[in-house]
Amino acid sequence: MKKENKTTGKLKGNMPTLIILIISGALIYALPYFRSYYYDSFVKLFNISNTQMGALGSAFGGASVFAYCLGGFCADRWPARGLMTISLIAAGLCGFILLLYPPYGVVFMVHLVWGITSILTFWSALVKAIRSLADSDEQGKAFGFFEGGRGIVNMVQSAIILALFGYISKAVSEKAALSAIIAIYSTICILLGAMVFFMFKEPERTDGVPEKLFNIPVLKRVAKMPTTWLQILVIFCSYAMIISYFYITPYATSAFGASAIIAAALGYFSQYCRPVGCFVSGILADKFGSSKICAISYVIMIAGIAGLIVTPGSPSMIWMILVFIAAIYASMYAIQSMHYAIMEEGDYPLEITGTATAIITPIGYSAEFFMPIIGGMCLDHWNNSETGYKVFFGILGALALIGLIAILAWMVITKEKRMQIMAEKNNGKE
C-alpha cells in the first residue's frame, strides 16, 4: 500500500491562497510605479516639475532601502497575515488621498508611506508566507509560480488599465482617466487586504513568538552562515542583469540599426519570457533541486550575454540577437524565481526567514543602486558607442560568472541538506 504523498498535497491545497498572494505581490507595487507609465499626465495634473517627479521616486526608493533592512525583523516578530493585510489596506487608503490632487508635500509623503507599506511590512512577510504554503520539496514550484504569476498579472493589468485610460481620456477627460486608474488600484489593494486576512492561514510557530523585535542571537547566527553570503551573491549577480536589461533596447538601435519600434519590442519581449522562465524553472527545481536549476540558468545567461557581445552589428543579425536576448530574459527570471526557493536547501527554518532576508535582501538588491551608475559611466566614457555597451555587457557577464561560482559553492555546502530533501520527497512517494 502506497503512502500518501503529503508534499504534493500542501501546495495544491494552498493554490487559491498562492494566487491571491501573487496578485497582491504584483498590484501593491502598481500604485507607487504607475506614475512612470503615465508620466506626462501625472506631471501636468499634479502640477509638479520633472525634478519633483524624480524626487517622488527617490522618496519611495529611499524608504524602500530602509524598509528592506528592518522588514525581515518585523516578519519574524508579527504574523505575516496581519502585516500583509495592513500593508495592502494602507497602500490603498494612501492611493485615495491622491484623488484629492493634494499639494506636492502630501504627494511626497504618500510615496514615502508606500515605501513602508510595500516593503517594510509587506515584502519579507510575503516571502515567509509563500515559504509556508509549500513543503521542502515544493519551494521551487511555489516561488516559480509566484514570480511567473506576477509577470502575467502585470501584463494583463497594464494592458487593461492602458486601454481604460485611453477610453476615458477621449470620452471624458485626462484627469478623469488618471483618477480612475488611482481609484481602481486603490480599491483592489484594499480588497486584496481583506482577502489575504480571510484566506491566509498563519503557520504555527515551533519556537514561540520572539519577545524582541531584534533577535540578536539569531541575527548573528544568520550572519555567520556561509550560505547567507552566497545567497547574497546569487541575488546580486542576477539582479544586476534584471535591472540592466533595458540597455539592450538602445544597443539594438545603435549597433544593429533596429528601428525604434523593433527596439521597443525587444524590451517588451522580456515580459513574455518571464512566465516561461519562472514556470519552467519552478517545475524543474522541485524535480532536480532549486540550486541545480539556478546554476543551469546562470550558464544560459552567460551564453546569452556572450552571444550578445560577439554577434556582429548588422541589421541582418537581428534574428540572432533575438535568440540570445530570449536566453537572457528567460534565465534571469528563472534565477529570480529561485532567489528564495533555495533557502530551504540553506537550512533556514521558516521562523527565521524574516531575519535572514533582513541581511540578504538589502545587500542583494543593492545592485539596483550600483548598476545604473556603472552603465551610465560606460556609455559616457565611450560616447554612447557600441564599445560602451559591450563593455557594460561584459561587466554583467563577469557578474553572472561570479553568480555561477557562488551557486556551485552553495551546492557543495548544502549537499547533505539537498540529499535529505530529495530523500524525504522519495519517501513520500513510496
Image: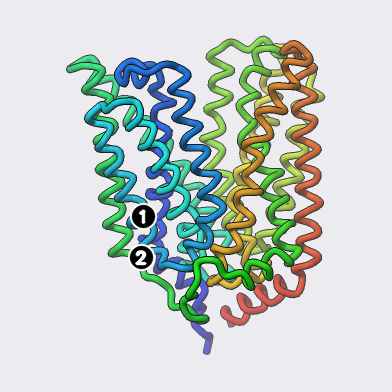
Q: Which mark is residue 200?
A: 2
Q: Amino acid at mark 1?
A: Ile
Q: Nearer the viewer, residue 83 or 198?
A: 83
Report whether 214 appears left or right of 422: left
Mark 2–mark 1 distance (CA, rounded to whole Å): 9 Å
User: Badge 1: how crowded within 10 Å, few (<14), some, or many (20+)?
Assistant: some
Regarding residue 164, the answer to whether it shows in the image is no
Report whether 146 appears left or right of 237: left
**Residue at figure coordinates x 33%, y 55% from the top left:** 86
Mark 2 and mark 1 residues within 8 Å of each other at the beta carbon: yes
Report whether 397 appears left or right of 263: right
- In the rendered view, tell whether residue 420 sits above or below residue 127: below
**Residue at figure coordinates x 53%, y 55% from the top left:** 70
- In the rendered view, tell whether residue 292 sits above or below residue 266: below
User: How was the colour assigned to the protein in this rendering?
Assistant: rainbow
Report whether 394 appears left or right of 239: right
Q: Which residue is mark 1?
A: 20
**Residue at figure coordinates x 35%, y 21% from the top left:** 42
Q: Looking at the figure, which quarter contains the C terminus?
A: bottom right
Secondary element at tag 1: helix
User: Residue 139 location, x and y as percent?
Assistant: 56, 63
User: Residue 174 location, x and y as percent?
Assistant: 26, 17
**Residue at figure coordinates x 77%, y 40% from the top left:** 399
User: Residue 405 location, x and y as percent?
Assistant: 81, 51
User: Badge 2: how crowded within 10 Å, few (<14), some, or many (20+)?
Assistant: many
User: Residue 245 location, x and y as percent?
Assistant: 63, 30
Secondary element at tag 2: loop
Q: Which mark is residue 29?
A: none
